Image (cartoon, coloured by chain):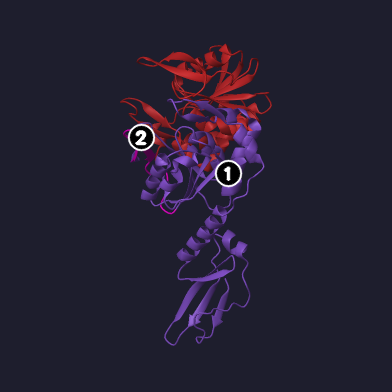
Amino acid sequence: MQTIIISPLVSHRLCLARAVPCNRLLNNHHRAPPSIRLSNHRSTTSLRLFSSAGSLCVCKSDAEYFAKAAASRDSEMATEDVQDPRIAKIASSIRVIPDFPKPGIMFQDITTLLLDTEAFKDTIALFVDRYKDKGISVVAGVEARGFIFGPPIALAIGAKFVPMRKPKKLPGKVISEEYSLEYGTDTIEMHVGAVEPGERAIIIDDLIATGGTLAAAIRLLERVGVKIVECACVIELPELKGKEKLGETSLFVLVKSAA
Amino acid sequence: MFAAENGLKGDPRLEAISAAIRVVPNFPKKGIMFQDITTLLLDHKAFKHTIDIFVDRYKDMQISVVAGVEARGFLFGPSIALAIGAKFIPLRKPGKLPGKVISESYELEYGHDRLEMHVGAVEPRERVIIIDDLVATGGTLSAAMSLLESQGAEVVECACVIGLPEVKGQHKLKGKPLYVLVEPSGLDEFC
């Protein structure tokens, strides 16, 4: 741990003996971050220094430092917006079935993606590349198609998989969250104790339409103190504006499709 | 057949898997000791062991299809499929699959249920394994086998994480081998 004593006459501007590389700070979950001691006439305060992408901030506690490190990783992730060459193959492997489950709906059928071993492998790889090494300990997947994509991702990034289910399917004690459908409401449930406060999670489903289900999943996890890093879906139907229902939670999708 | 009797006797991974499964008494109704695999999914090491054991068994058997029974078969099947380079086919409750389907009825304790598969998902002579979390009477797996065989596929084996006492000693289900990792956990194993 580095300790740098600086003159009490230095006010807002903090000078370091040498710059600390950003990556080393962000990847070191367990080592205490560098600290600076500021002396004034009455007391000595120990502060943590956080450095990311050229900006510097003074954090008042280790907790604040690690929160900023996590947020920085998250915002760097969200700004990436380059079309990966694997996306086209994935998009073309998805079958569209008109008028299912009712007239006027163009159903995005991912079962054909699952029959294309390269496309399925690429789908998982794209999510794994994005979420590995980001301190994510929970992959939550919405029944039932979230169960197909979530577990392979969880296994690859070393996270637990938490199924979010329709009512009465989970056998133990549950917490539930209701959400609106076009007509009426539905409920999703999660086992009590599956996640712990402070854990970082991603939520997986095959597709986001209106965003109702994912918004309910976010609320359910936030109620127990989990930080949702991102929602991830294979397909988005942007015309249905589901992203807006997710509030501050970012959304990552591989394929955008007409509703 | 149980994994312990079939090459994995004393394998510590089996104990870890068994210990990670939670028993919930009287679910869905009184008298049933429900084998809850959600706790296995929370234990990354044990979950990985589960997949690894199935992958090691099937990777050199020229399996081109892993069929998984909704919904808990979906939790295990895709990871196995990805690792062995096979397609994953979901076998679903009625009305869920959007395209043209074939369906098979099977018996429950009281009444019937149906299992569906997309037409064209599997091709004749493909070698298939069927995955579910647990086998009790074997009714669901038998229906799954019928669906696949009706399309000309060859069911090589049925594989489950947990096998209830009814299947112990049964090496075959409808003439096809059955491979199970662990027996049900007892209540006293749940802390």
How many neighbours does mark 1 have within 10 angstroms: few (below 14), some (14-19), or many (20 or more)? many
What color was chain B assigned in the picture?
red
Q: Amino acid at mark 1?
A: Phe
Which chain does the numbered disc 2 sit on?
A
Q: Quadrant of residue B175?
A: top right
Instruction: Give the residue pinned by disc 1.
Output: A127
Residue A44 percent location from the top left of the image? 46, 81
Residue A80 percent location from the top left of the image? 59, 52
Q: Nearer the viewer, residue A85 or B188?
A: A85
Q: Secondary structure at mark 2?
A: loop
**What are the residue bounds of the magenta stretch?**
A178-198
Instruction: Give the residue pinned by disc 2.
Output: A182
Which chain does the numbered disc 1 sit on?
A
Q: Is residue B159 left or right of residue A223?
A: right
Work out whether residue B173 can be spotted: no
The tag earlier along the polypeptide, 2 or 1, is 1
